[in-house]
Image (spheres, rainbow, N blue to C red):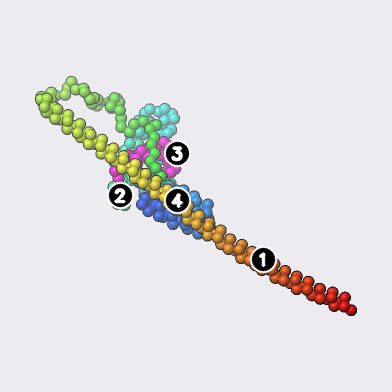
Amino acid sequence: MDLESAAAELYGVDPDAFIPRRTELVRAARLAGDRSLAAAIGKLRKPTRSAWLVNLYARSAAEELAELLELGAALRVAQEQLSATELRRLSTQRNAVLTAASRRAVTLAEARGYRATETVRQEVSQTLQAALAEPAVAEQVRAGVVTEAHSYGGFGPLIPSPNAAAPPGVAPSPTAGEVSESAPDEPPMDELERARARRAREEQLRAEQARTEAEHRLHAAEAALDRAADEAEEAAEQVAELADQITALKSQLSDIEQTKTLAEQRAADTQATVAELQGQVRAAREAYDAL
């Protein structure tokens, strides 16, 4: 096992299984004696939900992704050459491809039992768009190891501006507050009906804003929970590693104590032998002196 294969496996599992599996791989590397690999695996970050969808798409639709990234290269060339006509053509193609890719990612996630929120869907689209513009992001997406959402706005808006020129032969739509001269007269509406319609629109807008804010809060809470779980798991891994080090040091200390005991025993035996020999020497000297 190496870091690349470990990352490929980890970023292919569901987010809920990421941390338990990472812990298993860290322990396996540690048991194999490769502490540097264990530390590197332990630093791999759990992907957010939107990042997981992008990774799922990259692994399940490699050919489609390759076409998407080729389109990004073409867009960068057109932008460098300031080719407005080519940029418009490629931007239209980009919008269609991004929409299809985002939908495919959402469908793949649903097949795995996860229904993406609107916030997650937007982040998937933004990350794929960033991959079109940023080679570093493109490499992460291609490898299927994205950990968080990315964004980029250098290729212009996904939706044409309301003031953009209309195609030949198509009359531009009137903007808000404008009424086309050729438009038929609308039936009169009294003030009460207009007020009711305005209140209904305002309530709908507030409800949509509240839902979007709730989704953002939920997404932020999920991300904070993931980070806290990561930190707790990393702390547990550090405790386990320190426990292993303590066990090893205790074993070394036991060996040292045993060696010290043996050395002390040998020293005592040597001293006893010296004392015995000294006694023999004294006895021999006394016997000699008596002659």
Please identify the residue farthest to the bottom as the structure is shown. 291
The quadrant the C terminus occupies is bottom right
Q: Is residue 123 magenta?
A: yes
Give the labeled residue for mark 4. Answer: 235
Q: Earlier in the sequence, mark 1 or mark 2?
A: 2
Q: Which residues are magenta?
A: 116-141
Q: Position of residue 12 (x, y in %)?
A: 39, 51
Q: CA distance from mark 1 to mark 4?
A: 41 Å
Residue type indicated by callout 2: Tyr
Q: On the rendered structure, is 215 left or right of 32?
A: left
Q: On the rendered structure, is 173 left or right of 57?
A: left
Q: Earlier in the sequence, mark 4 or mark 3?
A: 3
Q: Earlier in the sequence, mark 2 or mark 4?
A: 2
Q: What is the crowding at mark 2: few (fewer than 14 residues within 10 Å), some, or many (at least 20)?
A: some
Q: Is residue 182 visible?
A: yes
Give the labeled residue for mark 3. Answer: 135
Q: Nearer the viewer, residue 93 or 29?
A: 29
Q: Nearer the viewer, mark 3 or mark 1?
A: 1
Q: CA distance from mark 2 to mark 4?
A: 29 Å
Give the labeled residue for mark 1. Answer: 263
Q: What is the crowding at mark 3: few (fewer than 14 residues within 10 Å), some, or many (at least 20)?
A: some
Q: Earlier in the sequence, mark 2 or mark 3?
A: 2
Q: Nearer the viewer, residue 277 or 232?
A: 277
